[in-house]
Image: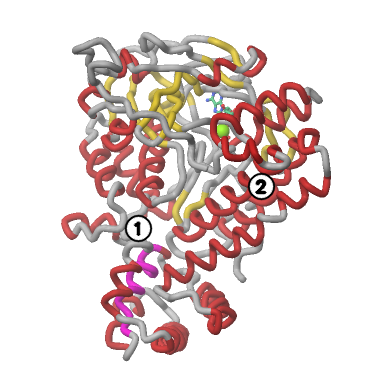
Amino acid sequence: MLFDAALPHRRPAVKSEPGLFSIGTIITAANLPLDNSFASLPPAFYTRLMPTPLPAPYLVGVSAPAAQLIGLTPDDVAASLDILIGNAVPERAQPLAAVYSGHQFGVWAGQLGDGRAILFGDVAGADGPLELQWKGAGLTPYSRMGDGRAVLRSSIREFLCSEAMHALGIPTSRALSVAGSDQGIIRETMETAAVVVRMAPSFVRFGSFEHWYYRKQTDQLKVLADYVIDRFYPALRDAENPYAALLEEVTRRTAHMIAQWQAVGFMHGVMNTDNMSILGLTLDYGPYGFMEAFDANHICNHTDQQGRYSYANQPQIGHWNCYALAQAMLPLIGDVEATQAALDVYQPEFGSKMDELLHAKLGLTMLDEHFEADRTLFDDLFAILPGVDFTLFFRRLSGVRAADAGGDEPLRDLFIDRPAFDAWAERYRDRLRAEASDDVKRAVAMNQTNPKYVLRNYLAQVAIEKAQNKDFSELERLLKVLQRPYDEQPEHEQYAALPPDWASHLEVSCSS
Ligand code: AMP
Ligand code: MG
């Protein structure tokens, strides 16, 4: 193979109905029925603090589906600009920055923490509790050398990708809004500040566990694990060893999430253990990218010179990160064998999810008698794919006909080595005929698994440059396109096109 390697409990949706609040109360971002379950942890887990105001804020973007999750309309959100930027605090907010530690690029980095994120509470969302954070709202005790800020460019990138990943069906934190201010922020060049309001059931990371392990504070480690189990994995309470069960479930979710990344060509860019979610969510969008011209060794993060987090390495790094979590949880699990057994689910879970996803991408049914040959077919496909646009290839693959090469042309056009493509396509056709595949039905199914629209770097860049000039229309349009990645959207065909030449010079790095 090319790659080695409990839903949050439901609570009622927010409704502005009499009974839940006093009659006639209208819910806005200002009076959200906030709680803060994380604040119920001992004080050593966080520092309470307020966001630092920014001058003359303006609204950059709102995600309507994200707003809906917490019972707000986009207009409700837009009306609360002071809250979105962190200049005002909702009535029931309990703002805090959490402490955590982590391994960065394979090296123990010691204490980190929310250096520019501030958690201000959680609400009962339509699909369970959701915590809300400002990202970029000022200094915290964990800011280290940083300024506590995020620039407009990286805020837009986080906003767009969070919502795009969700629409692709990949577990992720969500983004409610981006608000900007013209306050200057120094990076490689002078940029301006912005704040994203992001949401997830929890922002607890692998590094949150490592923090207490490396400090040898097993009591706090236990408090954290119990909190995570009780609130997010209640079914595991009944397991023989709930901590081993937690490790196993997190390992499984992580393996599945990374298989989903591979399947759409998503590269995270900074898979440090402090960026790995204990809920198996894609978290902390920085120098991420979507594969364009296929290169298994592609590195999307300019800062990652060794390519530790290249596309091909992601599955193994996911496994490595689960090892780091396992090490941290060992004092709770109490037994090396049980810990190892929990970790050992990674490879089979990743492998079977990847098999499932690749079969779906090729429109093939998983059949025992073809299983080994299918794996060879996939490997041979990735061997001829270098240089070919990943997203366009899989989207156009649905046009292939089982009977003859009559539908091949748009796909074939993507290849320089056309004889290699023809040889592979003949084998693919044989395989389709072996299961009497129906061209029409297969195409419909494949188009629900192979997106037409992904967040290519240049698309984000165009929206960013317009937003930097206070034109937010392109951001709004792009967000809408990405919210329906599997639909044809003929009016937006240009968003599915190959990147222009200038895009090859785009670089994204950790500094944002
Ligand atoms: P990242 O690699 O972006 O996840 O960041 C690693 C750590 O650095 C996290 O603890 C962040 O909160 C912190 N950090 C990143 N950028 C800044 C910044 N501009 N100001 C303060 N802390 C930051
Ligand atoms: Mg981070």
* Magenta-colored span: 391-401
The location of residue 481, given as percent across then percent down, is 26, 49
Q: Mainly helix, strand or loop, the magenta region?
A: helix
Q: Is residue 220 magenta?
A: no
Q: Is residue 277 visible?
A: no
User: In which of the image's four quarters is ligand 2 placed?
Assistant: top right
Q: Position of residue 352 (x, y in %)?
A: 57, 64
> Which of these two is toward me, 224 or 18?
18
Residue type of the residue flagged with mark 1? Pro
Q: Quadrant of residue 326?
A: top right
Question: 19 or 304: nearer the eye?
Answer: 19
The mark found on residue 499 in the picture is 1
Under circle 1, the secondary element is: loop
Horizontal side of 444 relative to 24 (left or right) equals: right
Answer above or below: position of 141 versus 265: above
**Residue occupying image coordinates x 73% and y 28%:** 110
Could you give the CA–CA distance between mark 1 and mark 2, rounded to whole angstroms? 40 Å
Task: Locate residue 138 relative to residue 46 in the image: left or right.
Answer: left
Residue 379 image position (x, y, % from top left): 56, 75
| Res. 64 visible in picture | yes
Residue at horizontal 80 percent and vertical 34 percent from the top:
331
The one nearer the camera, 204 or 177, is 204
Farthest left residue? 491
Which of 302/423 is in front? 423
Q: What's the residue type where badge 2 is placed?
A: Glu
- Tell me the tag on residue 248: 2
Whole-percent x and y of residue 438? 31, 81
Earlier-in-chain disc, 1 versus 2? 2
Q: Quadrant of the N terminus?
A: bottom right
